[in-house]
């Protein structure tokens, strides 16, 4: 199992806090590289000051992604609620254009948004690796699928596009049906287990995590840490109360 590390602290309200967040990630990259760990970092755009000053956010991310490229690591820019979708993807594309950091930055696409088909087309054309997830925010029916069946169908549709794109993507899900759909499709298409990875949350469905590794599939564990856990937890409740029940239920299953 490999890891992506997330230092908690999204939605900062000052330039000082944004710069402090960036410094934590620079320390992480150095420690990861020095230890030879199979690990990357995940960062939210609002943690780097997107709500304060978009230019500040771009500069901080630019330094971070260049640093990651220099030490052979990778920065995944996490996705937040729909008000941030376009700005976050534009940021990823802009960072990817820098020849010093091309290939060291990736995006996240949420399958339940109607716009996601067009978004993955744009990102894949630019050679940007994607983490595909279902989506955790409580979005309105005007912009997102609400029924689980529709979300699942869209997830599978996008997964197939990603696996046949020739790029290395992450399939982020704890849903056994989505996992088996991915494995079945990869086997039918002759896509090797080394050409993509599954991604799951730390501590959630550990039984499923171990089973995937035993079957020869790559798995990356999303590992958040830090003192800002309480506001992070409360935002998750506000966004979608079902998230909390899901996590608690599956922790005890593992």
Image (cartoon, rainbow, N blue to C red):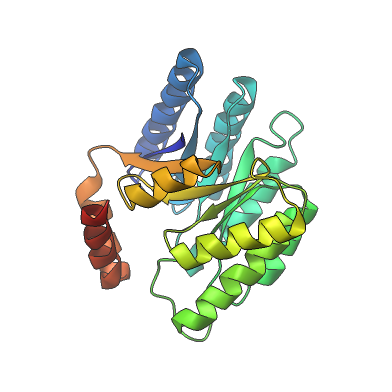
- Left or right, 115 with respect to 43, comes to right
**Residue 78, x across and y down, in percent:** 49, 51
Answer above or below: position of 49 versus 108: above
Name the spot of residue 171 as percent of width and height, x first.
55, 54
x 49%, y 67%: residue? 177
Measuring from the top left, give residue 101's x and y in whole percent: 69, 32
Who is closer to the viewer here, 47 or 71? 71
Apparent side of residue 25 relative to residue 225 in the rendered image (left or right): right
Q: Quadrant of residue 67?
A: top right
Can residue 86 be seen? no
Coordinates of residue 224 in the picture (x, y in percent): 34, 42
**Relative to residue 81, is residue 126 drawn left or right?**
right
Report the front residue among 153 and 19. 153
Which residue is the extreme one toward the front? Answer: 215
Q: Nearer the viewer, residue 17 or 192?
A: 192
| Rendered position, 33 above or below 203 | above
The image quarter in which residue 14 lies: top left
The residue lying at 58 percent from left, 77 percent from top is 153
Residue at the image position 58 percent from the left and 34 percent from the top: 74
């Amino acid at each position: 199992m490999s890891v992506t590390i997330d230092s908690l602290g999204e939605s900062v309200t000052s330039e000082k806090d944004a710069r402090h967040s960036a410094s934590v990630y620079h320390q992480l990259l150095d420690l990861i590289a020095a230890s030879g760990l199979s690990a990357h970092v995940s960062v939210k755009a609002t943690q780097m000051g997107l709500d304060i000053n978009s230019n500040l956010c771009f500069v901080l991310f630019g330094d971070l992604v260049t640093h990651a490229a220099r030490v052979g690591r990778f920065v995944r820019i996490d996705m937040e609620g729909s008000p941030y979708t376009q700005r976050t993807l534009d940021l990823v594309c802009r960072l990817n254009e820098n020849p010093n950091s091309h290939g060291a930055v990736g995006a996240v696409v949420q399958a339940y948004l109607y716009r996601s088909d067009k978004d993955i087309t744009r990102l894949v054309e630019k050679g940007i690796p994607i983490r595909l997830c279902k989506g955790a925010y409580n979005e309105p029916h005007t912009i997102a699928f609400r029924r689980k069946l529709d979300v699942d169908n869209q997830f599978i549709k996008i997964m197939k596009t990603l696996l046949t794109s020739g790029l290395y993507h992450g399939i982020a899900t704890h849903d056994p049906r989505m996992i088996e759909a991915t494995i079945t499709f990869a086997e039918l298409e002759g896509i090797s287990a080394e050409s993509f990875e599954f991604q799951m949350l730390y501590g959630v469905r550990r039984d499923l995590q171990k089973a995937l590794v035993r079957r020869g599939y790559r798995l990356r564990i999303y590992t958040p840490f830090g003192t800002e856990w309480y506001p992070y937890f409360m935002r998750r409740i506000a966004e979608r109360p079902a998230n909390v029940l899901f996590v608690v239920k599956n922790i005890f299953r593992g």
